[in-house]
Image: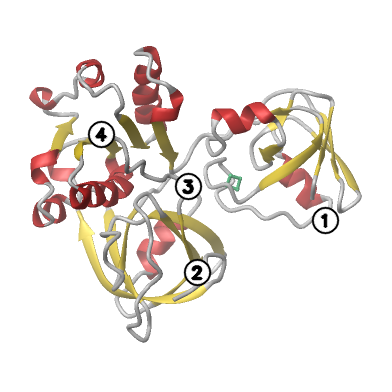
């Protein structure tokens, strides 16, 4: 229906309020035409707009990649966010139209793997549901470990059961000691060629990824997608030249490169401003970045030829970026 980088409207066909403050939104094209196919792990960029709120937010697709009639996303109401999720909860009524970009996929499934271990924490289960549907269709071995605070706050349970995924889903609830995830054992018992996927709150992701690294899993078989992250803008001031704009700014501690450039009148594209979405990635022409994002992988960071300017800083006194 649309190219990857175009903005287009989708209508909210159905809203289901799930436990745990999650709104499940089913989106269709206004004229009922088929939607652009997507691959498991993909997300939509959604324009969240109401009053002073004017943001683009990323939401993973949890619907079946084989279905092109509708997309489905899950939106967690998060009072600690900058207003995007609260606003979307408020404005997302059935029949309303949302502006969309994508689907885009920065979290692809390695379909050739003989086994996949999917770890979803809370709302981080959404891309895992799409991955589980795809792996089930391929007849591949997989387990989805779905971790939530309690059974009563566990969203998507009905959907998981209706999709026939239950046999491959193990629930872990913080308040049920008998459901504890024995991570070391799961990692130790996995196939030598298995791949891990993890999405959820930062502490949950750090725990899974840290355990996998400690157990000797190569980073190429450990895949993650952050929904949000804390931004650390501590450290010495440095200079940034935006080469194409001809602007030089000093980036003080506590301020991001994107903020400093914006204040100097440079147009900077940002979305999450937390180093997770990739919108602000710029080419680095000179200097050494201090990478603090969760978007670039370790190999990309090591090359030092691109950086996320919403959160990353500099190891050198000066950076020249292509902006
Ligand atoms: S704006 Fe999302 S990574 Fe920088």
Which residue matches tag 4? 114
Foreground disc of the pair 1, 2: 1
Q: At 23% across and 48% down in the image, what residue appears? A: 20
What residue did someone put label 1 on?
265
**Residue identified by numbered label 3:** 106
- Categorize mark 4 by other alpha carbons within 10 Å: few (<14), some (14-19), many (20+): some
Q: Nearer the viewer, mark 3 or mark 2?
A: 3
**Label whose residue precedes the other's in the sequence (4 or 3):** 3
**What residue is shown at x 38% (from left), y 83% (from top)?**
30
Please report whichever mark, 4 or 2, sits nearer to the chain's N-terminal start: 2
Query: Residue at 54% across / 33% down in the picture?
Result: 297
Across and down, in percent, residue 302 comes to: 64, 26
Residue 282, x across and y down, in percent: 71, 45
Asked whether residue 44 appears in the rendered view, the answer is yes
- Calculate the distance from the C-alpha at mark 4 to the C-alpha at mark 3: 21 Å
The number of discs equals 4
Q: Is mark 2 within 8 Å of ligand 1?
A: no
Q: Which residue is mark 2?
A: 50
Q: CA distance from mark 4 to mark 1?
A: 51 Å
Q: Are marks 4 and 3 in contact (CB under 8 Å)?
A: no
Extreme-bottom residue of the structure? 31
């Amino acid at each position: 229906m649309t190219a990857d980088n175009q903005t287009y409207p989708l209508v909210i066909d159905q809203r289901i309020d799930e436990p745990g403050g999650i709104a499940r939104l089913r989106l269709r094209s206004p004229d009922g035409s088929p939607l652009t196919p997507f691959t498991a792990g993909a997300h939509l960029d959604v324009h969240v707009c109401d009053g002073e709120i004017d943001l683009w937010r990323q939401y993973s697709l949890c619907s079946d990649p084989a279905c092109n009639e509708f997309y489905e996303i899950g939106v967690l109401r998060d009072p600690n966010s900058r207003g995007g999720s609260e606003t979307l909860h408020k404005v997302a009524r059935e029949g309303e139209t949302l502006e969309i970009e994508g689907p885009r996929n920065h979290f692809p499934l390695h379909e050739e793997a003989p086994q996949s271990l999917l770890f979803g924490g809370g709302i981080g289960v959404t891309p895992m549901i799409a991955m589980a549907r795809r792996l089930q269709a391929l007849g591949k071995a997989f387990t989805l470990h779905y971790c939530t605070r309690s059974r009563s706050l566990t969203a998507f349970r009905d959907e998981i059961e209706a999709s026939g995924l239950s046999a491959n889903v193990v629930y872990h609830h913080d308040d049920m000691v008998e459901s504890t995830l024995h991570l070391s054992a799961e990692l130790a018992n996995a196939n030598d060629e298995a791949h891990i996927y993890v999405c959820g709150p930062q502490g949950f992701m750090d725990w899974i990824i840290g355990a996998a690294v400690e157990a000797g899993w190569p980073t190429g078989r450990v895949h993650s997608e952050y929904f949000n992250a804390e931004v650390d803008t501590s450290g010495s001031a440095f200079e940034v030249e935006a080469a194409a704009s001809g602007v030089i700014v000093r980036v003080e501690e506590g301020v991001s490169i994107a903020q400093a450039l914006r204040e100097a009148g440079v147009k900077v594209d940002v979305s999450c401003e937390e180093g997770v979405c990739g919108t602000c990635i710029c080419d680095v022409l000179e200097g050494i970045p201090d990478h603090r994002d969760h978007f670039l992988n370790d190999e990309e960071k090591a090359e030092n030829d691109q950086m996320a300017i919403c959160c990353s800083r500099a190891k050198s006194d000066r950076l020249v970026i292509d902006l």
